[in-house]
Every structure is written in C-alpha cells, then in structure tokens.
Amino acid sequence: MTSRDLGYLEDMRLHAMDALAIAQRIGRDEFLSDRTMQHAVIRCLTVIGEAANRVSEVTCKALPNVAWGEAVGLRNVVVHDYQRIDHSRIWTIVETDLPPLVNALNAYLSDVD
C-alpha cells in the first residue's frame, strides 16, 4: 500500500468516526432539525467519498467489504445534487454503513502498522 493510500484510508476512518460521534451525541431527531449538524455530517461523508475515490485499485481490492462505489456515489450526490438530499437517509447511512466501515478500516490499518 502506498503512503497516499494510507493517508486516504486514515481520512476515511477519521471522518467516519467524527460522523458517528456527532450522531451519538445528538440523536436522530436533533440531527433532522439541526442544519449545522446536518452540514457537519454531510461534510464528513463528502470527505469519505472523496478519499474513497482516490484510493488505488490494489488497495480497494484488499478491502472488499468496503462499499467503495457507494461512498463515491454518495459524495457525488451531496456535492452535485444537494437539493435532493434526504436527511433521514443520511442518518440511516451513518447508523448502518459507517460502523462496518470503521471496523474494516481499523482491522486493515492495524495489520499495516
């Protein structure tokens, strides 16, 4: 794995953990009513998707449980089609998809160290 890939994977992990921390702190109802928190979480998801798009194919193949295409696709939606963002869906993504992402990245990165 290249040092660039390592940086991208660490960015993904850090921003996923940040989004999860926000979700744990405020809960669903507050998230759905607080635009500042929505923007913060969406920024985290944007960085995850951008970093995922930059990870090399070799490293992507080493992490088959990571939904690379979905992460990049979500980034494209929140950046380019932002008027259609469904914040309930964003909340579900944070609750459902980010914990396994963090687990996969933690396992992979601990093996690299």
Image (cartoon, rainbow, N blue to C red):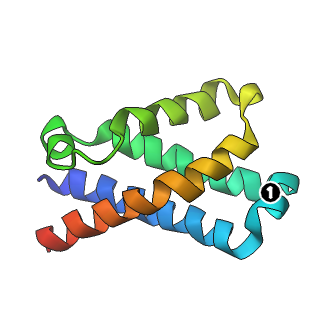
User: How far from the left and from the top, in percent, is residue 95?
Assistant: 58, 58
Query: What residue appears at the point 11 percent right and 53 percent down from the top-left corner?
Result: 1
> Looking at this view, is 25 or 8 the one in front?
25
Could you say where residue 57 lies in the image, as x and y percent from the top left?
17, 36
The part of the image, by quadrant, that contains residue 54 is top left
The local crowd at label 1, few if under 14, some if 14 to 19, many if 20 or more residues have their Cα within 10 Å, is few
**Label 1: element kind:** helix
Name which residue lies at 53% across and 29% down: 76
Residue beneath the point at 21% across and 42% down: 60
Residue holding disc 1? 36
| Image quadrant in which the C terminus is located | bottom left
**Displayed quadrant of residue 13:** bottom left
Give whichever of 45, 2 is nearer the camera: 45
- Placement of 69 over or under 61, stated as above or below: above
The residue furthest right is 33
Task: Give the image quarter of residue 70.
Answer: top left
User: What amino acid is labelled 1 in the image?
Assistant: Thr
Q: For this view, does 94 lie left or right of residue 26?
A: left
Q: Say if residue 42 shows up in the picture.
A: no
Question: Residue 40 at what x, y percent from top left?
Answer: 68, 56
Q: Is residue 108 above or below residue 97?
A: below
Whether residue 69 appears in this view of the structure is yes
Query: Residue at 53% across / 35% down in the picture?
Result: 74
- Residue 39, position in %: x, y? 72, 51
Residue 84 to residue 64: above or below = above
Nearer to me, 43 or 91? 91
Q: Is residue 56 above or below residue 95?
A: above
